[in-house]
Amino acid sequence: MLKVEENQISAIGRVLNDQNRPLKERFRALFTLKNIGGSKAIEQIHNCFKDESALLKHELAYCLGQMQDSHAIPILIEILKDTTQEPMVRHEAGEALGAIGDSSVIPILKEYSKDCISEVAETCQLALCRLEWLQSNNNSTNLQKSPYMSVDPAPPADITDVKKLKEILLDENIPLFERYQAMFSLRNICTPESILALGEGLKVGSALFKHEIAFVLGQLQEEIAVPHLEASLKDTEENEMVRHECAEALGSIATPDCFDILNKYINDNKRVVRESCVIALDMCEYENSSEFQYADTLGKVAA
């Protein structure tokens, strides 16, 4: 946790909560608060859940989960229960509760594992599996941090054969948690063969599954994934949760082709896709710049 004065945290929070500021600045403020950590940063993030942007609110929940601080649990439960929130926001709250790894949330996750919104129900089912896995493996640190510095919804499978992992990934008769395990193994293997296998995952399964595939391809930042991500982004019949994640993944890969693709969808009919392209283009610029870090708001408010 960074040592930051309370007034600085409040100043960063004002950037995050200012709806008149560009969305890309607010995202950078959010990730600055995530990196700072602690109850005051969590409080500033909590204040933003009344925002009109589903994209921003879903990212708030994601960051609270990645912080792995139990102070965020009541906030995330509140968001998961709130049926006026968009499904992608509630789903992210459920995933965040699993990421924190506290067994006290098992009853609430069980309740919402039967939610009428499939993305929410599936997320809570996965979160329960994650907590059960943690308990049976004595809170193994293997699950806590991936090679990509993220807290993942499932541990990688104990398999290294790409062909076998691909079979598991694409088989909709296999439990979702096991398919997620195959997904993270393929990510960690990180060969052209494993990346192409993940790309095929964008064509099968639920919106939740496909959106996680897109997220993982963004973590890999490999150009070979671009055609798969572009195909899903341009498919207007695809769930907006998947399309938004494909846009952000293209922003992380940040090749000139990615920049051109994202500019095509900057005026998309779906707000969450439009906003994702804005954030992704900012990420493209960051990846191609000499900036030291993306989450840079602390330096700007202190200047």
Image (tube, helix red, strand yellow):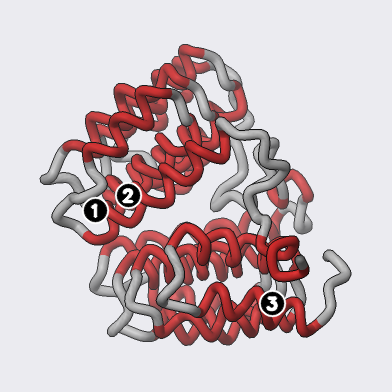
Out of 181 and 235, give the one closest to the viewer.
235
What mark, if any, has residue 41 been given in the picture?
3
Residue 192: x percent and y percent? Answer: 49, 13
* Amino acid type, mark 3: Ala
Residue 118: x percent and y percent? Answer: 27, 63
* Amino acid type, mark 1: Glu
Snapshot quadrant of residue 302: bottom right
Above or below for 56 versus 277: below
Residue 136: x percent and y percent? Answer: 70, 56
CA distance for labels 2 and 3? 26 Å
* Amino acid type, mark 2: His
Q: Give the mark count.
A: 3
Residue at 45 percent of width and 24 percent of height: 255
Of marks 3 and 1, the one in the foreground: 3
Position of 130 with respect to 8 (left or right) is left
Residue at 50 percent of width and 22 percent of height: 222
The residue under label 1 is 240
Is residue 209 in sight in this rendering?
A: no
CA distance for labels 3 and 1? 29 Å
The residue under label 2 is 244
Residue 203: x percent and y percent? Answer: 24, 32
Q: Are marks 1 and 2 in contact (CB under 8 Å)?
A: yes
Is tag 3's residue or tag 1's residue first in the polypeptide sequence? 3
Position of 59 with respect to 240 (left or right) is right
Above or below for 210 versus 165: below
CA distance for labels 1 and 2? 6 Å
